[in-house]
Amino acid sequence: MTEFLSMNKTLLSFTCLLASFLSVNSGTFASHVPPAKSGSGAKRSVKASEVKLPAGFTASIVAENMGSTRHIVVSKTGDLYVKLAKLKDGKGIYRLRDTNNDGMVDEQVGFGDYPGTGIFIKDGYLYASSNNSIYRYKLNDKQEVINPDQPEKLVSGLREKDRDKSKSIAVDNQGNIYVNIASDNDRCREPNSGKGIMPCSLLDSAAGIWRFKANVPDQPFSSGVRFATGLKNVVGLDWNTKTNSLFVTQHGRGAFDDFYPQYYTPQQSADLPAETMYELHQGDDAGWPYVYYDHIQKKKILAPEYGGDGKKLGTAKTINPVAAFPAHMGPNALLFYTGTAFPERYRNGAFIAFHGQSQSLHKGYLVGFVPFKNGKPSGPWEIFADNFAGIDLVKPTGPVQHRPCGLAQGPDGSLYVTDDLNGTIFKISYQAKASK
């Protein structure tokens, strides 16, 4: 499983732990350790200096106590637009501005009376999503919203249930908007059963990416095109301008051992399946719920609900991931870096905000990076920014302090990271001279 990590020197100890983990065969596992709790007990904001970064990079905090900040975009003028999962003072979107250039936000303007996750800027418009609709706002020359109380509703009627309701969005260069509609049934099982629903009826309206027009108002769900299917929950989306294609990061399914202990141990349920990155094209099928990706075997495996035993291969008709990550790390944002402020190796590569943690590796709540070359991953993923949790995940003594959720690139080439637990927004900059 060499595809996991090529760690920098500051994370050498983790490399050793990971190598040990990867060397075990599929029948031998370390003892299971529950994940650290988040959101309980005393909270504190991790100091910017506590964020662990590669040499030459520094972190700063630009805003705090913003609430459940999900995805974020930065305008050409440097304003931050953040989407909130829960309303703050009755508003679900905030424009944040540093008016005196001291590195801290000192002006907040709230608008939008709906919670949600998705937010995107494209061609003079701010796009935002609630948990069932998509809106857009016209921007003026200063990249400010012109009529914040009168958004144009583009799409309505998107499936919204009690779980996995976020509607992440991305816009391409041809006037199309893409939206994630997650499955609210983790494995598409029949109620109180380990038997899979065949065929999975959820695929008609969920577990995929739908495409709509980015400039047509009042589109019902029925007018959309199912762009790709077999994706349980995709919170991270980004349009790659180099490949002119959509990339996404998927949250994997949950437990295997509850109804299938003859095939899976509790530890295997903690280690499988991989979280995955896909490059998507019209008509692609990533396989959920029938197939999952096993990053230990490096194979697509037939799910047990549909006749699998942990070894039977899934159908060849489903697409392969372009990258895979440890189970349950929760990739909540994907951003292709197009700036020039960071060293050359980061250019056109993919940053990923991980919202959860690997229970076996005791690593998580971090920002990862996948190097790209010619539109494809050119090496294993690595940890870029760590310790947002603010605690030792091996032996936690308190609650997790921050959960990275959103990513955005600033006009100066810096990287912004949101935290939807403690409402902190971090800015990561490169101080040394970038390589040419």
Image (cartoon, rainbow, N blue to C red):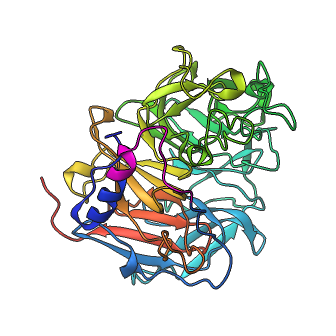
Looking at the image, the residue that sits furthest to the left is: 436
Position of residue 429 measured from the top left corner of the image (x, y, whole percent): 31, 68
| Image quadrant assignment for residue 273 | top right
Question: The N terminus is located in which quarter?
Answer: top left
Numbered circles on residues, count:
0
Q: Is residue 436 above or below residue 27?
A: below
Membership of 199 in magenta stretch: no
Position of residue 148 measured from the top left corner of the image (x, y, whole percent): 69, 61
Position of residue 321 measured from the top left corner of the image (x, y, whole percent): 46, 31
* Magenta segment: 19-32
- Dominant secondary structure of the residues highlighted in magenta in the image: loop
Image check: 411 left or right of 104?
A: left
| Residue 124 visible from this viewpoint | no
| Residue found at x 51% / y 38% | 248
Position of residue 395 measured from the top left corner of the image (x, y, whole percent): 50, 74
Q: Nearer the viewer, residue 20 or 68?
A: 20
Q: Nearer the viewer, residue 430 or 306?
A: 306
Membership of 25 in magenta stretch: yes
| Residue found at x 22% / y 63% | 9
Q: Is residue 65 above or below residue 363?
A: below
Q: Is residue 24 above or below residue 11?
A: above
| Residue found at x 69% / y 59% | 147
